[in-house]
Image (cartoon, grey):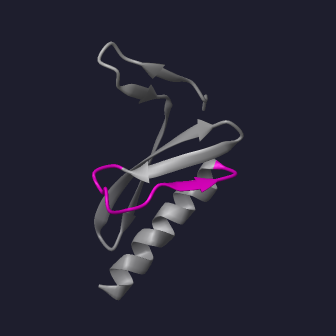
Amino acid sequence: MTSTTKKSSRGRVQRQGQIYRFTIAGTAYATFIWQHGVLFRGRVEGNTQVPEQTGRTALAVRDALQQWLITRSASA
């Protein structure tokens, strides 16, 4: 992964990263994870209620996002 960000002609920021997919309780999720300096950041696509996570590795970020979703689905 690279830490490159670009501004498009409309002023939007485009990040280069990777999509990680997983399923929890029969629901499929896609996370987008990118490198920001020496850390990684990530979010769940289409789920704005899930807070952005930061970690030392992409897998740590993916695991934190999964854990947040599992915790919320268990309390629902």
Q: Residue at x 49, y 29 (%)?
A: 16
Outermost residue, front side: 11
Q: Which residue is drawn at 34% across and 21% down?
A: 11
Q: Which residue is drawn at 43% across and 51% down?
A: 43
Where residue 69 appears, x then y in whole percent? Answer: 40, 70
Does 67 appear in magenta?
no
Residue 34: which quarter of the image?
Answer: top right
Name the side, left or right, on which 35 lies relative to 73.
right
Name the side, left or right, on which 21 lies relative to 47.
right
Name the side, left or right, on which 30 lies relative to 18.
left
Residue 3: which quarter of the image?
Answer: top right
Q: Is the magenta stretch mostly helix, strand or loop?
A: loop
Quadrant into which the C terminus falls:
bottom left
Outermost residue, top side: 9
Q: In this view, does 18 lie above or below 45?
A: above
Along the line of sight, the residue nearer the viewer: 38 or 45: 38
Along the line of sight, the residue nearer the viewer: 11 or 26: 11
Quadrant into which the N terminus falls:
top right
Along the line of sight, the residue nearer the viewer: 10 or 44: 10
- What stretch of residues is rendered in magenta? 45-57
Where residue 8 appears, x then y in whole percent? Answer: 36, 17
Q: Which residue is drawn at 28% across and 65% down?
A: 27
Q: In this view, does 21 lie above or below 50?
A: above
Where residue 30 appears, x then y in whole percent? Answer: 37, 50
Where residue 46 appears, x then y in whole percent? Answer: 27, 51
How many circles with numbers are drawn on the protein?
Answer: 0
